[in-house]
Amino acid sequence: MSFMRLLPGTELRISALGLGTVKIGRNEQVKYPDAFSIPDDSAVRTLLAQARELGINVLDTAPAYGTSEERLGQLMEKRQDWVIVTKTGEEFSNGASHFDFSAAHTHMSVERSLRRLRTDYLDLVLIHSDGNDGAILQQGDCVAALQDCKRRGLVRAIGMSTKTLDGALRAVRELDVVMLTYNLQQRAEQPAIALARELRKGVFVKKGLMSGHVRQDGRDLVRDSFALVLGEPGVHSLIAGTINPAHLADNVRLAKEVIDNATGFRPSPE
Ligand SMILES: NC(=O)c1ccc[n+]([C@@H]2O[C@H](COP(=O)([O-])OP(=O)(O)OC[C@H]3O[C@@H](n4cnc5c(N)ncnc54)[C@H](OP(=O)(O)O)[C@@H]3O)[C@@H](O)[C@H]2O)c1
């Protein structure tokens, strides 16, 4: 089993652990257990270099993560070394989220992400759901606009970050990739992982560390979290958010241990 694997239906070679970057761009209206300060440029540069050094190549960002996209564009070295995942549909301003899944907004958002990230292609763009997964897919404008961006070579793969099982199942059937919640406390979307495996679609997991609620009843649940998520057949990459270099090192070590010991998952080799 390999820490690097191919994302089905694409030529993207991705690490089993990705770096979530909410905390480098936004610290208001977030659900983490502890308040935090946004790291300065030097700390972000060091974190990105450490992630690459440890073998991580997936960066997960979004327009809704405050300055995350812009800062990655500014501070990331060697863009070609990274698989960049960003989103469309959610905007965060004046302390609140707003959603727009129209074709015009989707095109604007993709073009703005390209500018902010200082690149001419995005590896993966996900629809950033407001919870109405099915309605967004049914309405179809956002998907059609993303497909157009894909045809034009601006985007390599498209998907949806879902909030419901029905939405996740539908996203698996209709798009290249689903990003869903799967952790020790929330396993409702597991059938979508199973379906994706059957249909050979990509699966990214968000909130695998329960958004940081990993110390409960005196127990440290980080290892158990990685064992659950990365031991699940069909999961390609767990996006774990951290701005703490010690946590990043622990996470890669634990992810590699879990992958080495897992028996069920058979990703395509790199
Ligand atoms: N598409 C969406 O709708 C959506 C929604 C939510 C999240 N996401 C993406 O998924 C990523 C992860 O989600 P998330 O940030 O909500 O949840 P998460 O990865 O489950 O948890 C992140 C939290 O866990 C803490 N943490 C990380 N490693 C740890 C360790 N070894 N020991 C103890 N604590 C640890 C981090 O704190 P430290 O910084 O102190 O390590 C951070 O507060 C986000 O950054 C984002 O990229 C996407």
Image: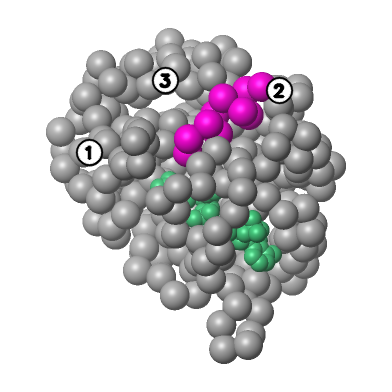
Q: Is 221 included in the stretch rendered in magenta? A: no
Residue appearing at x 44%, y 41% in the figure: 177
The label on residue 137 is 1
Cα separation between marks 2 and 3: 18 Å
Q: How crowded is mark 1: few (under 14 residues within 10 Å), some or many (20 or more)?
A: many
The label on residue 60 is none
Q: Give the x, y percent position of residue 164.
A: 28, 57
Cα separation between marks 1 and 2: 31 Å
Which one is in front, 205 or 76? 76
Q: Give the x, y percent position of residue 189.
A: 36, 63
Query: What residue type is disc 1 on?
Result: Leu
Which label's residue is closer to the chain start, 1 or 2?
2
**Which quadrant does ligand 1 occupy?**
bottom right
Check the picture and name the quadrant holding the N terminus: bottom right
Q: Residues within 10 Å of mark 2 (few under 14, many from 20)?
A: few
Helix, strand or loop at label 2? It is helix
Q: In this view, does 46 lie above or below 152?
A: below
Magenta part of the chain: 65-74
Q: Mark 2 points at which residue?
A: 80
Look at the numbered disc 3 and say if its residue's Cβ is closer than 8 Å to ligand 1: no
Q: Is 72 included in the stretch rendered in magenta? A: yes
